[in-house]
Image: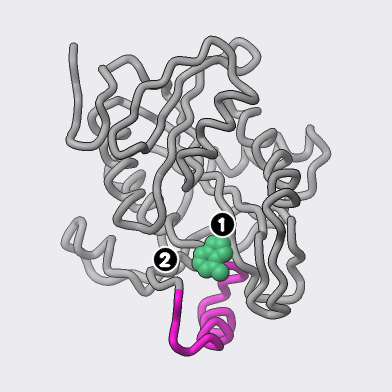
Amino acid sequence: MATPTPHIEAKKGDIAKTVLMPGDPLRAKFIADTYLEDVKRFNTVRNMFGYTGTYKGQLISVMGSGMGMPSIGIYSYELYTFYDVDNIIRVGSCGAYTDTIDLYDVLLASSAYSESSYASVQSKQDLKPYTYPSKHLNQAIKEAAQRLNIPIKEGIIHSSYVFYRENFDDYKTIFQDYGAIAVEMESFALFHNAHITGKHAACILTVSDSLVTKEATSSEERQNAFTKMMEIALALA
Ligand code: HPA
């Protein structure tokens, strides 16, 4: 049966039960080209490329989410609701809020803090500052990381809806008051969508920059660090 949505042209059945979601659609292409076999592209709408293939014989999909909660909110909702996807694992980058985290560290989100109204608007509920990933996916990710001997740090992440803040030092308050150790822009909405659809989500991040030390990584260095995170995520196929 054909099931195109406004943003995904795939047919029902074209997408695996588990989808890895980097923000960048070209990163999705890179993952498909590098790690998957028997790859079929299922989406080109808005160049938000999506691919299904096999990893060690297991079917898995990978698709870009775009940047920010409105974007991942649309794609994850359509994947869960119209394409029967069960698990979405965001694989992204983040900025460190504390000097106990180093560039290239791999982080696992234990919850997402946000000042965003995404969740309260989406399902008419009171504003809540945190949303949560799936316990069983997080457990599977930690076990995969251990098996692969890749260190992973777990903590609260900040899903910000503003990248360029006028007051750069705002991050200090968010670290102190809400416990967020790093910042990205998507997981709060992804976790909420998983919750309201009865599905599962998790988020693994590679630290690409530090708001404390102002260091940033080169794109080549990022690629290496990214490989570790991808191996963990793909192990869930
Ligand atoms: N802010 C928001 N999102 C990010 C950052 C950042 O500094 N780094 C990587 N994703």
Pointer 2: what residue?
130
> In the visual, does 157 lie left or right of 194?
right
Pointer 1: what residue?
110
Q: CA distance from mark 1 to mark 2?
A: 10 Å
For numbered disc 1, what is the local secondary structure? strand
Q: Please tell me the numbered disc located at residue 162.
A: none
Where is residue 94 shown, x and y percent of the image? 59, 61
Q: Is mark 1 within 8 Å of ligand 1?
A: no
Q: Residue furthest right?
A: 149
Q: Quadrant of ligand 1?
A: bottom right
> In the visual, does 107 lie left or right of 20?
right
Is residue 83 placed above or below 93 in the rendered structure? above
In this rendered view, identify the residue nearer to me: 70 or 221.
Answer: 221
Bin the neighbour count of mark 1 within 10 Å (Cα to Cα): few under 14, some 14-19, many 20 and up: many
Of label 1 and label 2, which has the lower sequence position? 1
Where is residue 119 shown, x and y percent of the image? 28, 61
Displayed quadrant of residue 156: bottom right
In this rendered view, identify the residue nearer to me: 67 or 218.
Answer: 218
Is residue 59 placed above or below 110 in the rendered structure? above
Q: Is residue 157 visible?
A: no
